[in-house]
Image: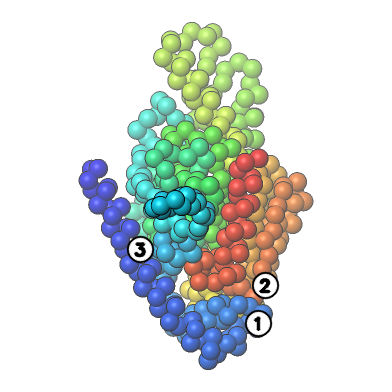
Amino acid sequence: ELLAHSFIHLLLYLYSYSYSQLALKAWNIYFPMHKLLLSNKTGIHPNASYEYHAMTTILYWGRLFPVTIARMRFSLSQLCCCHGVETYPLTKSIVCTSTTTGNRNSKTSIQKERLLKAANVHVIQYDMAQKRDLHLPTPYKRVNAPPTTNQSANENKVDPTEVTGYIIQHNHEPSKKILLWLYGGAYLSGDSKGNLNFAEKIGQQCDYMDVFLPNYRLLPEYTFFDAIYDVCLAYEYLITVRGYHPKDVMLFGISSGGGLLVRLLQRIVEFKNEMAVHEGDDHDECDYEGEIIISSDGNQDGNRDNNVEKKKKKKKLLQLVPSGALLMCPFVDYTKPKGSFIEYIAHDLIVNESVFEEGEQYLQTLGSEESNRRESPVHRSCKGLPPLCIITSEHECVYDQDILLCNNARRDGVRVDLGLWKYMCHVWPVWSGFIPESRQAVDFMCDWMKEISSS
C-alpha cells in the first residue's frame, strides 16, 4: 500500500510538472506576440493588464462551443497545468558564503532563490464508522432531497461514512494549523486532484500551512444536500479524527465551494443551538441520536465513562466555528438568476452563456423556489460566523450575491473583509501564474489568512 501511494504521488507530480511547463512555455511565446499585435484591445476595459487581455483572447472563443458536464469536468481537472512548481515561484532570501584563495576573506552575499520544494501529498480514504466509540456520529443529518439521475442513490437513502481526498503536507511533521480547501465547479464539476498545485502554492505562502482537499458528490448524479453532507463529514474528520482544534482550521472555498463553506459554518452554529436545547436537561444527557450517555445515578464503568468524556469533548469542539473563511468568488444564491448573474455572462470568461445554459437547469434540483431560497447561504442568518474574507470582481457574474452576502454578514455582526477588483472574470485568481491581477489577489488572500490564523 505504501509503494502504491508513493507511485501515485510520483505520477501526480510528473503529470502536473510536464503539462504546466508546456503551458508556461506556450504562454511565453504567445503573450509577447499578443501584446505587440493586439495590445489592450480585447478585454472589457483597457485598464486591465496586457496579460488579462491576452487571456481574454484565448478564452473568449469558448462561448461559441456547446458546454457539457463532461467538458466542464475535464477542464477543471486540468487546472493543475496552470500551477506547476516553475509557475509564479515563491522566493526567499538565502545567505551564500563563497571561500576564495589567498589573503582575501570569505564573502557573504544575499541572493534570491526560487523555492521549488515539492510538498508530500497523502491520499485520504477513511471510514468514519470504523471508530464509533471514539468519535461522534455526524450531527449534520441528510435532508430528504429530490430524485437524482443516480438510481442507486435514489434507492439507498443511507449516507456514506467514508471521507476521501488529499492532504498536502509541506514539512516532515504536520503543521499546527490546516487549510480546509473546497474546489468549485457550479456543483456540476471540479475535483480535489485538479486543485492540488494551486492549493500547494497557497499553503506555501501561508507559512507552509498543510491543506486538506476533501471530495464531495456532484450534480446531477447526486444533490446539493449530498454535497453539504460530505463537506460536513470532512470537517468532522479533521476535528474528531485528525485532532485539529477548530481554531486551528482555516477554510478556503472557490465559487460553489465557497457557498458550501458558508453553509457549513451556518450548520455548525445551528448545531450549537440545537445542542444548547438538549443540554438544558438537568438529569440525563443524551447524544444526538438519543442514546443516554450519562445517567443520573452515575453507575458507569471506567471504559464507558472514558468514552463518554471523549464524546462530550468532541461534541463541544464541533460546536466551535473555525478561525475564519476565505471565500473566492463564492456562489451563494440558488434562487432564480438575476442582476449580475444574467447581465455579466455576456463578457465573463468563465461563466459565459454556454455555461449558464448548461448549469441553470440544475438549480431546480433543490426543489421549489422557496426551498432554493431556504438553502441559499446568502439568505440565511450569518450570526455567530467567524471572520470572512470575500474576493470578487465588480464585473463578474456573482458580484451582486457576493456584495449581498457581505452586507448581510456585517449586519449580523460578522467581520467581513472585502477584496474587490475591476474588469476581472469569475475566479480569476486561479491564473496567478500568468495574470498580475491574479497574483495581487493571491497575495491579498494569503496575507488575510495569515493575519487571522495568528490572531
Name the residue beneath numbered marker 2.
422
The numbered disc on residue 45 is: 1
Q: Say if 33 sits above or below 137 in the image.
A: below
Q: Residue at image x 43%, y 46%?
A: 170
Asked whether residue 331 appears in the rendered view, the answer is no
The residue at the far front in this view is 103
Q: Which of marks 3 and 1 is nearer the N terminus?
A: 3
Asked whether residue 416 appears in the rendered view, the answer is yes
> Front-most of 56 and 253?
56
Q: Position of residue 194 (x, y in %)?
A: 40, 61
Q: Helix, strand or loop at disc 1?
A: loop
Q: Tell me which amino acid carries mark 3.
A: Ser
Count neighbours of disc 3 (C-alpha within 10 A) and say few if under 14, some if 14 to 19, many if 20 or more.
many
Q: Residue at image x 36%, y 49%?
A: 121
Q: Helix, strand or loop at disc 2?
A: loop
The residue at the far bottom in this view is 37
> Front-most of 27 and 364?
27
Q: Where is residue 66 in the image (x, y as percent from the top left)?
A: 44, 81
Name the residue beneath numbered marker 3.
16
Check contact, mark 2 vs mark 1: CB within 8 A: yes
Q: Is residue 411 left or right of residue 264?
A: right
Q: Distance between the residues labelled 2 and 3?
A: 31 Å
Q: Helix, strand or loop at disc 3?
A: helix
